[in-house]
Image (cartoon, grey):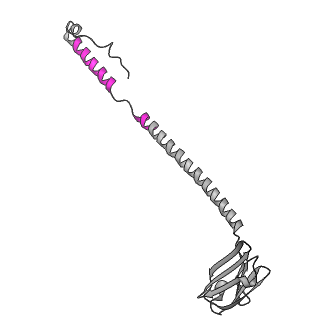
Amino acid sequence: MNCDLRHIMLDAASLTSRTPNVNMFRLVLIGLLSLAAAAPKPVKNDIESYMDHKFAVIDKKAREFWTEFENTMKTFEEKMEDLGRRFPNPVLQEGIEGGKYIIRLSIPGFKEDEISVVVKKHNMVVEAHHERGNSEDNFINARSLPSNVEGGEWSYDNDVLTIEFTVKQENNDDYEN
């Protein structure tokens, strides 16, 4: 309620010239109008607009975060795909075949005498090293072997390294293809 108290205010001389009841009424009326003008305004709209603003800011920041996150993940996926193209998986086959545990690796560009296969305690490391003038080609592949394989041999033909291990008869179902 907006009241302009300037129009209601009476000077002291005019209050004393009238009857006491009228003067008292005017004083009470002026007091009530002053209280009404000074009364707090409803804050519901202020709180609602404040909360709407805060939630809008939070919503905007959340959307920005998720947009940036999606863009970062897309870039990451593209880089991982590119990495996969540059470093393809050399494993062509791995599993039990005809009672033997066989691993076939694609190792192009090497000669058989440039390849080394070392097996120790169910771990295998395949290394290949080749020098061509000022450049070098290197390959390394390390992996764990199943506990039921023993003794093995390897051969290299048409850029494919084939490693064959004898399989002990116990637990060979765990490694079937």
In-front residue for pair 142/10: 142
- Residue pictured at 28% horizontal, 17% vertical: 30
Q: Give x and y (percent) for residue 136.
A: 70, 73
Residue 142 occupies quadrant: bottom right
Q: Give x and y (percent) for residue 140.
A: 66, 77
In-front residue for pair 163/53: 163
State yes or no: residue 177 in magenta. Answer: no
Specify the segment rendered in magenta: 22-48
Query: Taken as a whole, is the magenta stretch helix, strand or loop?
Result: helix
- Residue pictured at 74% horizontal, 82% vertical: 161
Q: Give x and y (percent) for residue 149.
A: 64, 89
Q: Is residue 26 above or below residue 136?
A: above
- Residue pictured at 32% horizontal, 14% vertical: 6
Answer yes or no: is residue 28 visible: yes
Answer yes or no: is residue 166 visible: no
In-front residue for pair 30/144: 144
- Residue pictured at 38% horizontal, 21% vertical: 2
Q: Is residue 60 left or right of residue 85?
A: left
Q: Give x and y (percent) for residue 84.
A: 69, 67
